[in-house]
Image: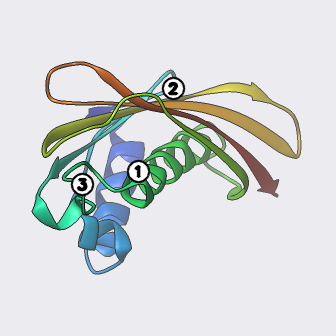
Amino acid sequence: MSGTGGDAMQRWAKLEELAATSFWGYLGCELVRVGERETIVRLQARERHLNMTGTVHGGVLASLLDSTMGIAAAANRPDDQVVTTNLNVHYVHPLRAGLLEVRAHVVHSTNRMMTVYGSVTGEDGRLGTIGTGSFRVKG
């Protein structure tokens, strides 16, 4: 995992270790990068992540977006707690099993609210899902 300064990276590494037994770990998420400009998460989508038609389940994609955008929001406001208040997801192309990459960045921030954009691409680099999220800052 790469990203911002040493203290911040230690904090994110510790949080990811704690998350291993949570839904994050159940999905199989990997935190690749936490930075001021962008957060990247990857998931090796396997059969358990698919729906009955053989594509990645929409709930998995929504969870990936919510988690990655939440990390981006939290990284932008490291001294505050942030929680999702709204999640908009657009499924633009079906994604199949393989390596998925999620990228997220903060597009707007006020004292109490943040708006974050995220995208999920498949192993072939094709855009599959996009989303925005609103996050409340609890200072």
Three-letter residue code for mark 1:
Leu
- Dividing the picture into quadrants, the one containing residue 18 is bottom left
Relative placement, left or right, of 14 versus 118 is: left
- Dividing the picture into quadrants, the one containing residue 123 is top left
Lower sequence index among marks 3 and 2: 2
Relative placement, left or right, of 58 versus 75 is: left
User: Residue at label 1?
Assistant: 64
Marks 2,1: beta carbons within 8 A: no
* Residue drawn at x 17%, y 51% as measured from the top left: 45
User: Residue at label 2?
Assistant: 36
User: Residue at label 3?
Assistant: 53
The one of 118 and 11 positioned closer to us in this rendering: 118
The one of 136 and 111 positioned closer to us in this rendering: 136
Marks 2 and 1, how far apart in space?
19 Å
User: Does residue 110 appear anywhere in the picture?
Assistant: yes
Q: Quadrant of the C terminus?
A: bottom right
Label 1: which secondary element = helix
Lower sequence index among marks 2 and 1: 2
